[in-house]
């Protein structure tokens, strides 16, 4: 397949994944993978934190101060003196608005943190599926090689018995088969490890058939604005906004809020109506240092946001460069190996049986063929991992839904 033909392909089909990501962003339905990931304890914890922030925001929608009920009763001789009244502290600087804004920003930041946790878990699951399927392919290939070597060994034994080959040929076949056992054992262990990783991430998966993943070419393009969609950058931007609101609130706390009250009752059988006023005095403690601390938090939050932008931009650039590098090598490998696998195996066996090549060369070439196919599987795994990493770094793994609100734009 040449470059012109490849450019006409509308989608890249990756064999490791579960869902059609080109539709995941626009669908209200949870796909199989996301439903499994949402059952993971880490995601449940992140969602609970998000919900807690929602409740806190609802709480901060209410007025800052409640009225106070006051009562007094005393006995003076034969007279009973009593009074009942209400007092109310007034939010004269409108601190309530800042508290409400801060709570809403905390809620938004918690949502982005939840999306970040979900993004990372989906990415880990896709990488685990990719590793599992690549290791499974390698295991099947090595099992096929074992069967080939066992068949070869039987033929060698027969030919040695007939005098067509020497005992050295049989020993070489034994050695190749024993080396294959060690390699197969390692791959089997790796397969068990990848299965355990999948079980940890998505629970019961053995009955699920992993389908193809259609990724549009648009998702694999690069531009300088991609970092803005990442939840880590959005969370940092929201925390910067939150710090600004905190600084405004700290400035308002430098001015105390007054309290007014009214009470009515009887004193010495005379009706009593009184008004009262109170105001805290910042004589022994003021809020100047608290305000200065809050302003420095704004500087820190802004710097954290700029650092997050810088980190994500360079991360995306690096993952895009890696993706293109693996794509180039993988396409070259496919063009190089296309049709050569089966032809080589058949040609080797035929030439060996005809005596055109020695057993040593046959075994060596057979081993090189296997190593080349194993390298191809590993290259495919790395290429697919590069796709996953790029989609992760650009936050294109279906982590948002129509139910998400309070979006901010860094």
Image: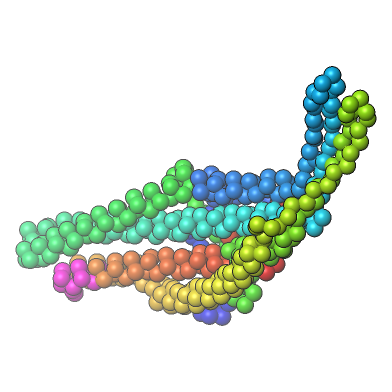
Q: Which colour style is shown?
A: rainbow
**Residue 94 magenta:** no
Quadrant holding the C terminus:
bottom right
Residue sitting farthest toward the front? 77
Instruction: Decide if residue 98 is in sight here.
Output: no
Residue sitting farthest toward the right? 271
Number of callouts: 0
Q: Tell me if 166 is positioned left or right of 401 in this view.
A: left
Q: Quadrant of residue 117?
A: bottom right
Q: Quadrant of residue 269?
A: top right
Rendering coords of residue 213 (x, y %): 55, 59
Rendering coords of residue 195 (x, y %): 39, 50
Rendering coords of residue 45 (x, y %): 54, 46
Q: Nearer the viewer, residue 117 or 135?
A: 117
User: Residue at left 85%, top 22%?
Assistant: 79
Question: Principal SS element in the magenta part?
Answer: helix
Q: Nearer the viewer, residue 34 or 250?
A: 250
Q: Tell me if 328 is positioned left or right of 371 in this view.
A: right
Q: Nearer the viewer, residue 304 or 299?
A: 299
Q: Nearer the viewer, residue 212 or 159?
A: 212
Give the residues drawn in magenta, as a range: 354-366
Instruction: Decide if residue 359 is in sight here.
Output: yes
Q: From this view, report whether residue 269 is shown above or below residue 346.
A: above
Q: Quadrant of residue 71?
A: top right
User: Residue at left 12%, top 65%?
Assistant: 172
Rendering coords of residue 407 (x, y %): 71, 60
User: Residue at left 80%, top 27%?
Assistant: 73
User: Residue at left 48%, top 54%?
Assistant: 125
Q: Tell me if 59 is positioned left or right of 300 in this view.
A: right
Q: From this view, report whether residue 283 is shown above or below residue 50.
A: below
């Amino acid at each position: 397949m040449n470059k012109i033909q490849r450019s006409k392909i509308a989608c890249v089909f990756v064999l490791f994944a579960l869902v059609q990501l080109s539709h995941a962003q626009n669908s209200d339905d949870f796909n199989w993978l996301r439903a499994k990931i949402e059952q993971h304890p880490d995601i449940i914890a992140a969602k609970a934190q998000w919900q807690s922030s929602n409740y806190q925001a609802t709480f901060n929608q209410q007025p800052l101060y409640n009225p106070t009920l006051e009562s007094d009763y005393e006995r003076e001789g034969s007279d009973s003196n009593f009074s009942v009244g209400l007092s109310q502290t007034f939010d004269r600087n409108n601190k309530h608005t800042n508290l409400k804004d801060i709570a809403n920003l905390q809620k938004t930041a918690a949502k982005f943190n939840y999306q970040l946790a979900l993004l990372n878990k989906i990415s880990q699951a896709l990488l685990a599926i990719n590793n599992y399927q690549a290791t499974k392919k390698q295991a099947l290939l090595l099992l096929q090689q074992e069967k080939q070597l066992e068949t070869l060994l039987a033929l060698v034994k027969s030919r040695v018995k007939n005098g067509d080959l020497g005992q050295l040929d049989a020993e070489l076949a034994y050695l190749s088969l024993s080396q294959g056992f060690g390699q197969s054992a390692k791959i089997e262990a790796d397969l068990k490890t990848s299965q355990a990783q999948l079980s940890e991430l998505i629970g019961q998966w053995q009955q699920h058939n992993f389908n193809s993943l259609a990724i549009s070419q648009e998702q694999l393009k690069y531009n300088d604005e991609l970092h803005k969609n990442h939840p880590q950058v959005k969370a940092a931007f929201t925390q910067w906004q939150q710090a600004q609101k905190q600084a405004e609130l700290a400035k308002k706390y430098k001015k105390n809020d007054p309290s007014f009250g009214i009470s009515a009752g009887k004193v010495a059988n005379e009706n009593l109506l009184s008004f009262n006023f109170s105001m805290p005095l910042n004589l022994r403690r003021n809020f100047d240092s608290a305000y200065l601390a809050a302003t420095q938090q704004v500087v820190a939050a802004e710097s954290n946001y700029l650092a997050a932008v810088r980190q994500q931009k360079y991360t995306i650039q690096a993952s895009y460069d890696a993706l293109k590098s693996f794509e180039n090598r993988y396409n070259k490998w496919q063009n190089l190996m296309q049709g050569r696998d089966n032809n080589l195996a058949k040609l080797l066996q035929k030439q060996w049986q005809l005596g055109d090549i020695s057993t040593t060369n046959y075994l060596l070439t057979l081993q090189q063929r296997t190593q080349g196919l194993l390298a191809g599987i590993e290259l495919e795994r790395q290429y697919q991992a590069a796709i996953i990493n790029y989609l992760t770094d650009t936050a294109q793994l279906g982590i948002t839904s129509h139910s998400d609100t309070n979006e901010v734009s860094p």
